[in-house]
Amino acid sequence: MIFADAWAWLVDPVNWSGGKSIPVRVGIHLMYCLGAVLGASAIAVPLGLYVGHTGRGAVFLVGGSNALRALPTLGLVTFLYLVMSGAQVTSVLIALVVLAVPPILAGTYAGIQDVDRGVVDAARGMGMTGAQRLWQVELPNALPLLMGGLRNATLQVVATASVAAYVGIETLGRPLLDGLRVLDYGQFVGGAVVIALLAVLLDLLLAIAGRLVVPKGLRLSAKPRRVRRAEAGGAGEKAGVVEVGGSTA
């Protein structure tokens, strides 16, 4: 029954026209998500690159990231809205940036740390400066995990940007609030479905972007090392190759 009501709400022409239609709310939702992810990237990527490259501040990075993850986004939006005297846009964007920083920061830092130290040492032996090693060696090799952190942050922001409706912004959270207020669960589920579809679409787009940005030879670095070793071992057995002490026989 609920799903039938949700379908009826989704296909109702009234919800697809006007200033408060589904397309308009999708557009507003996307603008807040894009602003939050870009703002978080501007903060987290340089910080993650610096800490991962130099090794300085790693303890602070982990502690600060965990503290940010523990902050409730709705509570933060409400607090900022009250403190900033009703600044809707600013309060929501700050809260979403705080939400998006930890996964991007973790992905960037882990990507730099995951780079093979032998490759970095070889670059150092070739006379590369620290900046050259970072931009020409470490960052390209860190792209798989960095893109993974970006995708994770985007999914979290898309799902959480609904809280903007609590301060009067017409995002996709409005059908959720309106549905709960009048006990219209069809509208509530319909709004949730639209948010889920938007999240899936953005994740697919970022996955495609990742395949375009990350060289094919580096995509394996995004897999856990145990998985890569298992795959390599399986491939070696099929080919009749036995790996002994880092060499093949």
Image (tube, rainbow, N blue to C red):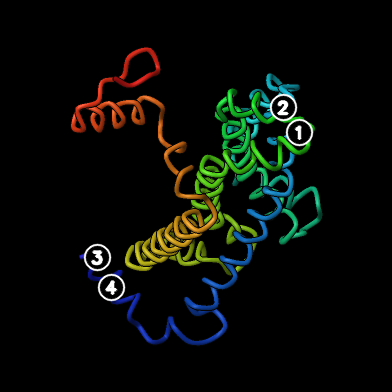
Question: Dot 2 lies on which element?
Answer: helix
* Residue pointed to by mark 4: 7
Amino acid at pointer 4: Trp
- Spatial separation of the CA atoms under disc 4 and disc 1: 60 Å
The answer to whether the residue labelled 1 contacts the one labelled 3, judged by CB atoms less than 8 Å apart, is no
Label 2 with label 3: CB-CB less than 8 Å = no
Q: Amino acid at mark 1?
A: Met
Mark number, residue 128: 1
Quick one: 123 or 232, which is closer to the camera? 123
Mark with earlier residue (4, 2): 4
Mark 3 crowdedness (10 Å alpha carbons): few <14, some 14-19, many ≥20? few
9 vs 201, left or right, is left
Residue appearing at x 61%, y 45% in the figure: 100
Q: Which tag, 4 or 1, sits closer to the chain's start?
A: 4
Q: Earlier in the sequence, mark 1 or mark 3?
A: 3
User: CB under 8 Å between callouts 4 and 1?
Assistant: no
- Residue closest to the eye, 243 or 170: 243
Residue 3's label in the rendered image is: 3
As measured in the structure, the alpha-carbon distance from the residue carrying label 2 to the one carrying label 3 is: 60 Å
Q: Would you say the residues marked 4 and 3 are in contact, meaning their CB atoms lie under 8 Å apart?
A: yes
- Please tell me whether mark 2 or mark 3 is closer to you in this view: 2
Percent coordinates x, y for residue 146 in the rendering: 57, 42
Q: Nearer the viewer, residue 248 or 197?
A: 248
Residue 206: x and y in percent read 49, 57
The quadrant of the picture occupied by the N terminus is bottom left
Which class describes the residues within 10 Å of circle 4: few (<14), some (14-19), or many (20+)?
some
**4 vs 1, front mark:** 1
Which residue in the structure is indicated by mark 2?
124
Query: Which picture quadrant has residue 124?
Result: top right
